[in-house]
Amino acid sequence: MRSNGQCVMCGQDKKITAHGLCTACYHRQRRRKGTDRVKGAKAAGLVLQVDFQPMSGLFEDLKQRADAELRDVSSQVLWELSKNFERRA
Ligand SMILES: [Zn+2]
């Protein structure tokens, strides 16, 4: 049975399909995955490449949390950021 929760992508309280994503975001991400590997993908401008070298410990922490919460690291970064912005709003 699917359960409700906060989507890690759009942040809305919805039925979670997989990977912490609501149905709409899950399918959006699935569609995008194929094009992400192609250079000059339509998503360009929404994709941020981050160099974690100055804070490699932070990357390890993110990876551990992502594993524990069954997300990929990118989704974990979005999740952590959205939580942080929520707290400050
Ligand atoms: Zn969503």
Image (tube, rainbow, N blue to C red):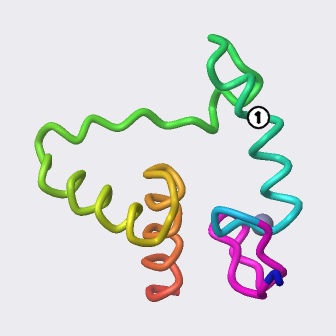
Spot occupied by residue 33 in the image (x, y as percentages of width and height): 70, 33
Q: What residue is at 12 percent from the left and 55 percent from the top?
A: 57
Ligand 1 within 8 Å, label 1 CB: no
Q: Per the image, is 7 magenta?
A: yes
Residue 9 falls left or right of residue 65: right
Quadrant assignment, res 75:
bottom right
Most foreground residue, 8 or 63 = 63
Q: Is residue 73 above or below residue 13?
A: above
Judge from the rendering whether residue 46 lies leftward or rightward of residue 22; answer left or right: left
Highlighted magenta segment, given as a residue range: 3-17
- Residue 67: quadrant of the picture: bottom left
- Outermost residue on the top side: it is 39
* Image-based side of 26 in relation to 63, left or right: right
**How many numbered marks appear?**
1
Disc 1 crowd rating (10 Å Cα; few below 14, some 14-19, many 20+) is some
Query: In the image, residue 32 lies at what x, y percent?
Result: 76, 34
- In the rendered image, residue 76, in percent from the top left (x then y), is placed at 46, 61
Work out whether 2 lies above or below 33: below
- Tell me if 2 is positioned left or right of 48 in this view: right
Please tell me whether residue 81 is drawn above or below residue 39 in the rendered image.
below
Q: Which residue is mark 1?
A: 32
Q: Is residue 60 magenta?
A: no
Residue type at mark 1 is Arg
Which percent across, then down, holds residue 68?
A: 39, 70
**On-image quarter of the N terminus:** bottom right
Residue extending furthest toward the front:
1
Residue 34 versus residue 77 in the image, above or below: above
Q: Quadrant of ligand 1?
A: bottom right
Please name the residue shown 53% across and 83% down the image: 86
Residue at image x 49%, y 79%?
83
Secondary-structure class at tag 1: helix
